[in-house]
Image (cartoon, rainbow, N blue to C red):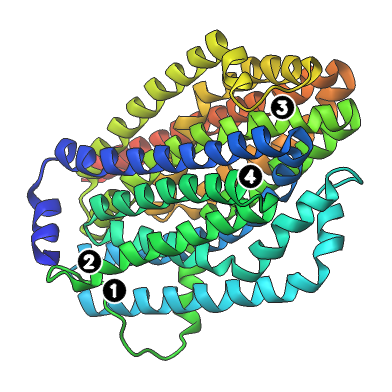
Amino acid sequence: MAQQSIHRLDTESVGKAFIRYLVPSTIGMLLMAINIVADGIMVGNRLGPVALGGVGIAAPVYTLFVAMSLWIGIGGATRFSALMGAKRTEEARVVFSHAMASIFAVTLIIGLVAFPFRTKLAYLLGANAETYPYVSDYLYLMLLFGFVFTMENALSIMVRNDGSPNLAMVSLITTSLLNIGLNYVFLFVLDFGVKGAAAATLLAAFVGMLVLCTHFFKKSNQLRFTRFKPNRKLLLLILVIGFPSFLAEVGMSVFTISHNNVFERLAGTEGVAAFAILNYVHSVMLLAFLGMGSAIQPLVSYYSGAKDQAKIKKTLQLAIGTAFVAGLLFFLFGQFFAAAIASVFGDFPEAVMNLATSGIQLFFIAYLFMGTNFVMMTYYQSTGEIRMATWITAAREIVVLLILLSILPVFFGVTGAWLAIPLSELIVLLTIVYYQMRQKKKTQFTADMTAHYK
């Protein structure tokens, strides 16, 4: 099927290829988002708002492991697809082997080194006397077994790039459904508390990885482990290509930590609980946009390796249009159903519900711009414009965000904190438009000069 898959990408229309990757990728990511929200609903309803806030505070550790898997996974997969597009199969397999071995070693070491310092880490993330026990319980298992996430997530990316987006979707569906089932058993039947929620997530990810491993038994499979010597240049290339993806996840951690601290300062535990609700909902939208990016990454990487600029342009147009429509729908959903969304997470005090409802309405403005930013970041990353891809990820949730988050609450209080991300996304989108206009002028100037001297 590898040969068949390559043949399909060489001959299949861009529209059909885009849909073929978009549908399973988006469905899989949305189901994973439902999985995350189900975690929040079960923890909130079973253990209460303080426990929910504690899990939210610990979430950046989970995000860090995902970030590592994306850094090496996306970097390796992008290079793998480009080499497949250039018909350099053996080199592509070396990239796959090198990437998977690196992910396992690095994330296992990170978890084991951080484990003895989990108490200090909990307070650094924003825990207080009320939330600390829940943060500590969640970190205990996450630090020891976080490498399960990285291996499962990276393998999913590789399988999708090897022409099996449907299997990647099935794996995500399996992981999501199993996690929801295990969460119910561990929380409501066995009363394992927050540790039960963490254990459910880890076990579900492990089973999802087993599902992905069935790809190796397909005749069409091109993902084969081969002997390789550690190659610094290759690892550096993978890290450079994947860095924007890593930074995007690190940015999510910065987003969570900075908002937790700001809301703790402005509104105490009630503010942290309200933000935790928003953060769970935000995960749904974020994963939907990530699904769109995941859909175009294998295509753009392959077309880039094949040097087919026309197909790259068409893919980008389709992705931006899809992202904008999705963002508009998300925005409208938040404006009309904010209270209903917040109430799903439990019967919280009125102060928490009011904060969460107004926060959803304000924060959802960001989705008008966020989808396009995601698509453009993936496009720049897949075509080798790493500096621009890095700027987008660094600005969205780190540089511009932190500047706005330090200024807006001073003048507008909690409202300013909710508006920091929407304004950050808008500013980044404007820089992308400016960059594209400059690139277009440069291209036109080059073409004019070439025509003149001919």
How many residues crowd mark 4 within 10 Å: few (<14), some (14–19), many (20+)? many
Question: Residue 84: which numbered mark, if any?
Answer: 2
Residue drawn 74% across the image and 14% down it: 354
Question: How busy is the neighbourhood of tag 3: few (under 14 within 10 Å), some, or many (20 plus)?
Answer: many
The image quadrant that residue 78 belongs to is: bottom left
The answer for how far apart the CA atoms under marks 2 and 3 are is: 41 Å
Is 258 left or right of 26, judged from the image as shown?
A: right
> Residue under circle 3?
420
Please report the residue visible at 31 percent of the width from the left and 69 percent of the height from the top.
213
Q: CA distance from mark 4 to mark 3?
A: 14 Å
SS of the residue under disc 4 = helix
Kind of residue at disc 3: Ala
> Marks 3 and 1, Cα distance to the nearest angstrom?
41 Å
**Labels 2 and 1 touching (C-beta < 8 A):** yes
Query: Which label sits on residue 92?
Result: 1
| Foreground label between 2 and 4 | 4
Q: Between disc 2 and disc 1, whose residue precedes?
A: 2
Q: Is residue 321 above or below residue 89?
A: above
Front one among 368 and 216: 216
Marks 2 and 4: CB-CB under 8 Å? no
Q: Is residue 87 left or right of residue 317?
A: left
Q: Residues within 10 Å of mark 2 (few under 14, many from 20)?
A: many
Quadrant for residue 25, please give it. top left
Task: Give the CA distance from mark 4 to mark 1.
Answer: 30 Å
Question: Which residue is under mark 4?
Answer: 252
- Amino acid carrying label 4: it is Met
> Which amino acid, by three-letter code, is at mark 2?
Met
